[in-house]
Image (tube, rainbow, N blue to C red):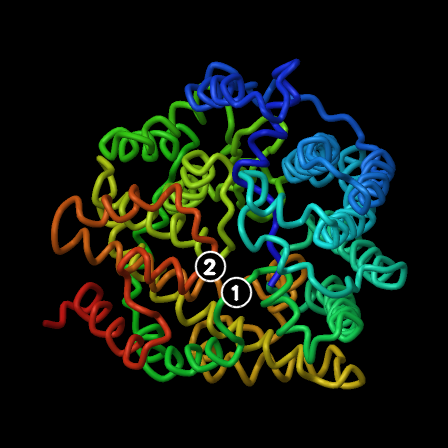
Amino acid sequence: MKKHLRSLLALIVVLSLLLSGCSASSFETFFQGLAGFLQGSLTVPFDDMTYTRPDPNSFVRAAEETSQNAQTAENADALMEEIYRCYDLYYDFYTNYTLSLIHYSTDITDIYWEKEYNYCQNQSAQVDGAMDALLYALADSPLRSELEKTEYFGEGYFSAYDGESFWDDTFTGLMARESELLNKYYELTGESLEETGYTDQYFSTWGARFAELFCQLVVLRQEIAAYAGYESYVAFAYDYYYQRDYTPQQAAKLMEGIQKELTELYVSIPDDVWAAGFDSCTEKQSLAYVESFAKKMGGTIWDAFLLMKENNLYDNRISANKSNTSFEVFLDTYFVPYIFLDPSGYSYDKLTFAHEFGHFCNDYAACGTAVNVDVAEIFSQSMEYLSLRYSDDAGALEKRSMAESLSTFVEQAAYASFEHQLYMLPKEQVTPENVRALYESVGKAYGFDREPGWDTRDYVRVPHFYVHPMYIISYVVSNDAAMQIYQAELETQGAGLTLLTENLATEQPCFLAFTKEAGLDNPFAEGRAASLRKTFEAILFDKP
């Protein structure tokens, strides 16, 4: 299970860009600088952030030199000075990469930002490979034990880097090829903006091109996993990308329980519940919604909102040229989170904003979160649900949100099941025809065919399948934990909010370990899906 350096080292690296003369051992100055960040006095407003095309070779050269020196270094502090320099360059690369993503997402028809984003994405494999090699070199350094005993890395950090790395020229080439295919996906997305979706014309033209590209990605990812020594891409992604402390087998059992216990409720959600999310909503109204609940919640959550609003660390503008997605990211060099939204103009935008604001608060409280995606999604989803109890104008959105929660369990479990089965197919069977047939089979098992207008080709319109494979199961497991926080709030006012705020700055990165520490039930325990069914029956169908 790989670990990525964040926490204290990340803070020191970022501060080193701003606090001249602050050495690794100058902790008094360091913590004074950290206090300035937390108080917002050193925050750079988003409009003042400057994108500069990053030079990956600067980081690669520094990482290679530090890797060599790590084998003969005799002083941990001196070695850490070199490591700080590497992370300065590493975070500079990814901060600019993220800025290019934000600007490109704002207008995916903008050729300049398309070019810059593609450049950064194409260079990322080289950068990640050099970072991986550096960490393996540090694990093999005679100073390893000293590094792990200090505040730099922590006990046992390098155990994840024992043995040999699979990041060689071949693996780097495979990852670069994946980046190229992802660039094609973004280009195709921009080109297809003018075409109306969910029509035969769309699926026979653009949809067919998306399907072919998707098959190429699946086969390539199978090759990546095999080269890395994993039995499947599912196992590779669970371990290498998401550092999960549960297995694909546990996840598959959870999906089966959801399909059995919740599908019938999902297809029976009353139409009037869905209608609640289609009132018109302006940009000002969605921001006011977040402001109202953040102010009532107070403390860290209110501080985070003020930081976001005063420094324009969000974009909730409505635009036809925006990327069809919403996300929150952390800009390491500037030491702040940022929210990007693609609003629909309907009242459901309030909940989407609340969701991403939950991520923002986690990043703000933890100074750049170190948790994996399963834990991170707990904060976003529980913030969305708790907003219903603290906002001034939730109204009919409460039932709508619970309908969305039920849909998250069923739809995302279906998507996750589809991914699991798809990546287990022999590569010669990964064809558009077979992929569509598999999607149809899974969709029917989860009740999709009972929804008006369902098209078995619409998997090509799910961005996560292309950009974040195996991420989707995170929505399912985290939603269970988020629902527990919401249920606690329903039972006792303030109980759910306390659960959320007490854990916003958690240093526990893994899902099952986090739920245990937070006193939450294990979502994989027998009977959890049945328990959820009873909760949804009571809220959505007024059953005792």
Q: Quadrant of residue 476?
A: bottom left
User: Residue extending furthest right?
Assistant: 169
| Residue position marked by numbered label 2 in the rendering | 510
**Residue at the location (53% across, 82% down)?**
442
Give the structural element (helix, strand or loop) at label 2. loop
Q: Position of residue 408 (x, y in %)?
A: 41, 64
Q: Measured along the vertical axis of the image, is residue 544 above or below residue 425?
A: above
The residue shown at (25%, 43%) is 394
Q: Is residue 398 left or right of residue 3?
A: left
Q: Which residue is mark 1?
A: 244
Label 2–label 1 contact, CB within 8 A: yes
Image-quadrant location for residue 287: top left
Residue at image position (43%, 31%) is 283
Residue 251: percent from left, percent from top: 47, 75
Going by the numbered disc 1, the residue's amino acid type is: Arg
Please name whichever residue, 45 or 402, is drawn nearer the observer in this view of the structure: 45
The circle drawn on residue 368 is none
Q: Residues within 10 Å of mark 2 (few under 14, many from 20)?
A: many
Q: Residue 364 appears at what percent x and percent y?
A: 44, 34
432 or 453, which is in the foreground? Answer: 432
Q: Quadrant of the C terminus?
A: bottom left
Q: Residues within 10 Å of mark 1 (few under 14, many from 20)?
A: many
Q: Nearer the viewer, residue 210 or 229?
A: 229
Left or right of residue 258, residue 105 in this image? right
